[in-house]
Image: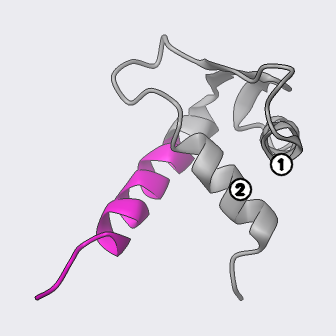
Amino acid sequence: MAFTHDVIEELNLLLKFPAESLMQGLKIHHDASQAIVEAASRLYTKGLITQVDGGYLTDLGVDVVEHTRRINSAMCIKFN
């Protein structure tokens, strides 16, 4: 099973949440692209973020972001 374009958009949005503190969130502004707005809405529906327009990560969201960052890090390794 491959990642869909929607899932990739969601993963990219999750990577934008601050890594430094769980007390920091994101606000999706009215001028954001439609793809970002829709990704945020799907993440909210899935229970990964607290607000349809961003907010904070839920406990599940924190877990998913940790895995997403590990996958992203592994996939960005450059071999000579």
Residue 19 rendering spot, x and y as whole percentages: 38, 30
The amino acid pointed to by label 2 is Glu
Magenta-drawn segment = 63-80
Q: Quadrant of residue 80?
A: bottom left
Q: Quadrant of residue 55?
A: top right
Towards the viewer: 80 or 58: 80
Residue 23 is left or right of residue 77, and the answer is right
Position in image of residue 59 (x %, y %): 58, 31
Q: Amino acid at mark 1?
A: Ala
Location of residue 64 with respect to 28 vertically, above or below: below
Q: Which residue is mark 2?
A: 9
Labelled pair 1, 2 in contact (Cβ < 8 Å): yes
Of residues 58 and 69, the one nearer the viewer is 69
Residue found 24% across the figure and 73% down from its top: 77
Residue 61 point in image, percent of width and height: 61, 38
Residue at 78% across, 19% down: 29
Is 6 inside the magenta-drawn segment?
A: no
Q: Quadrant of the N terminus?
A: bottom right
For image coordinates 67% across by 63% down, the residue present is 8
Number of labels in the image equals 2
Decide if residue 20 is on the left or right side of residue 2. left
Q: Earlier in the sequence, mark 1 or mark 2?
A: 2
Give above or below for 63 relative to 2: above
The residue tagged 1 is: 35
> Does the magenta-highlighted stretch encompass residue 73?
yes
State the separation of the CA atoms marked 1 and 2: 7 Å
Residue drawn at point x = 48 percent, y = 56 percent: 68
